[in-house]
Amino acid sequence: MQKADFDFELPTELIAQQPLAERSASRLLKLDKTTGQVTDRRFTDILEELNPGDLLVFNNTKVIPARLFANKPTGGQIEVFIERLLNPQQAKVLLKANKSVRLGTPIEFDGEPQLLVSAKQGMFYLVETIGDLTLSELMDRCGHMPLPPYISRQANAQDSRRYQTVYADEQQAGAVAAPTAGLHFDEDLLAQIKAKGVKLAFVTLHVGAGTFQPVKVDDLTEHQMHKEWLTVDQAVCDLVRTTQANGQRVVAVGTTAVRSLETAAASGQIEPYTGDTQIFIYPGYEFQCVDALITNFHLPESTLVMLVSALAGREAILHAYQHAVNQKYRFFSYGDAMLIV
C-alpha cells in the first residue's frame, strides 16, 4: 500500500487546541467494522457499548515534562526535548538551537550549567546531568509538558493535569506524549465501568516523539518504525487469555495499548514482554489480541491512521473520518474519540 492511500482533507479549525472543561464531555463516533455504519454518540455512552466480562486495556505510562528551555554558555537559546530517559542522570534528547551543538557543550538553566552534551546518535544527542542532580529534579523545576506540534501554543498549568490520564502511574513515568485515548476517562466513569463488570488491565508503553514523525516513504513496506519501550506482565496475559476463552472482547484504549498487546502476542499466543517494540500495523495485519478499540482521530498519512485502518478497513476509516469532518468533530490529542467495534 502507498502512503497516499491514507490521506484526507482536514480543516485546521478542527484541530483541538484546548481540552474540554470535563474529560468525559467529548463526542464519540462509533464505527462498526463489519457493516461500516457510523453512529454519533457521547463519550459517556461508552458505558452502554461495553459488556460485562469485556476487558479494557489501558496504557498507564506517565508523561514527563520533557520540554526544557535553556541557554548555551554563549547566551544562545537552546531547547532540550527529552526523547528517552536512559537512567536518572542520562537521557537521549533532541536539541533545537540556531547553530549545531558541539559535543562537550554545557547547557545552562538560570545561568548555571546543569547538563552536558556527551555524544550524538543520528538525530539525537546524549546528555547527562552535572553533579548529583537527577533529570527528574531538573524537569520538576524547569520542564514543560510536551504538547504535540499541532497544538500552536505553549503548555500551561492546566496541561500538567489534562495532558495526563487520571490513571497514569507515578512509577511508570517516561512518555513524552500522552496516550490520548485515555484522556477521556475520569474517575467516575471508570468506577461505573468497573461496577458493570468490565475488567480493567494496564500495560505500559512510553510514547516517544517518533509518534509524530511523518512517514517519509511512499511504499509502506519500506517504512521503519521508531522504537518505544513497553512492558506487558503476566497478569495482563492471564486476563487476555481468560477473556478470549470466555468469548468476550479485548478492547484496547488507544493505539499504544494495541501495539503493546500485539507485540506481546507476536508468536500467536500472548506472553509477558518487556523491551523495545518497532511493530508497524497497517492493512493486511492479522490481529492476535485486539477485538475493539477506543481511539482519537489521527493525522493524515500517519502510522496511527494506518493502524486503525488495519482494524476496521481503510475505506471504512476514511468514510468515518469524512463523517467526522462533516459533523465538526474535534481532532487529535485534545479532540473527540472514536470507538471501533
Image (cartoon, rainbow, N blue to C red):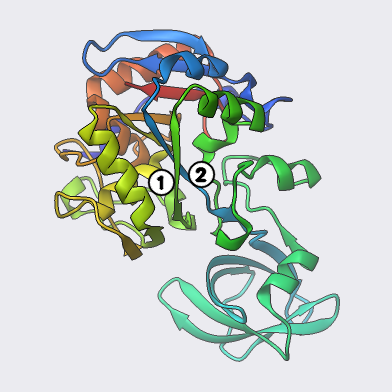
Q: Residues within 10 Å of mark 1 (few under 14, many from 20)?
A: many
Q: Which residue is drawn at 23% across and 10% down?
A: 35
Q: Are marks 2 and 1 in contact (CB under 8 Å)?
A: yes
Q: Where is residue 81 in the image (x, y as percent from the top left)?
A: 60, 64
Residue type marked 2: Pro
Question: Relative to the observer, which residue lies in front, 161 or 191?
Answer: 191
221 relative to 123 in the view: left or right = left
Q: Which numbered disc covers residue 311?
A: none
Q: Is residue 56 above or below residue 215?
A: above
Residue at the disc numbered 2? 179
195 relative to 250 in the view: left or right = right
Q: Where is residue 50 in the image (x, y as percent from the top left)?
A: 42, 20
Which element type, helix, strand or loop, lies under badge 2? loop
Residue at the disc numbered 1? 256
258 relative to 154 in the view: left or right = left
Count of number-bearing discs: 2
Residue type marked 1: Thr
